[in-house]
Image (cartoon, rainbow, N blue to C red):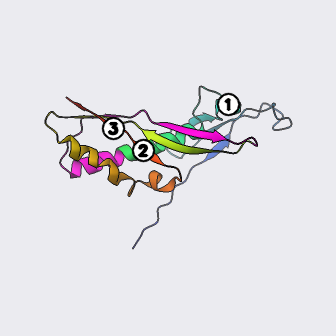
Amino acid sequence: MNSEHKYTSAVAWTGNRGEGTKTYRGYDRSWEIRTPGKPPVSCSNDPLLGGDPALHNPEDLLLSALASCHMLWYLHLASNAGITVTAYEDAPEAIGESEPGGAGRFLRATLRPKITVPPGTDLAKADAIHGRIHDVCYIARSVNFPVRCEAVYLEG
């Protein structure tokens, strides 16, 4: 039987400059994610939409969640397959589009993990793991855009 999991988050707008949303340019597109027991995450809108480029935006967070979920499943499945991973870094990239009315969406994402394994590792076996992840990863199973993986393996 399937089991349900509950996730919660608290989002609090921090961009009131004193007059709220009285005028379109009179407020900041900033907020904090305040999950109980965890440090707050300061966020802003995409800079293309007037946000602060120094803060995370929803698009950054979704892409990071996708890459993080893929990484965690990769590490788990590699361990189960007897493949030792000693380092894992990713530089994912997503392409989005915005419609003239402002609606937007992701069109696709590409994960680019650099995975360090000991010399002599079966790289074909290590690479095959990526194809199984989208069957189990919460985030990958939840998005409606294609996700590709272009992994690079380093021996060391």
Mark 3 neighbour density, 10 Å: few (under 14) some (14–19) many (20 or more): some
Stretch in magenta: 72-101
Hey, what amino acid is under mark 1?
Answer: Leu
Query: How many angstroms separate mark 3 from mark 2 (CA)?
Result: 10 Å
Q: Is residue 137 left or right of residue 153?
A: right
Q: Which residue is mark 3?
A: 151
Foreground residue, 37 or 123? 123
Mark 2 neighbour density, 10 Å: few (under 14) some (14–19) many (20 or more): some
Q: Is residue 38 visible?
A: no
Determine if the magenta segment contains residue 156. no
Q: Which residue is mark 2?
A: 148
Quadrant assignment, res 107: top right
Seen as rendered, the residue at the extreme top is 54
Hey, what amino acid is under mark 3?
Answer: Ala
Where's residue 32, x and y in %? 61, 38
Q: Residue at x 47, y 44 (%)?
A: 65
Foreground residue, 13 or 156? 156
Between label 1 and label 3, give the one nearer the viewer: 3
Where's residue 67, x and y in %? 43, 42
Q: Residue at x 48, y 39 (%)?
A: 64
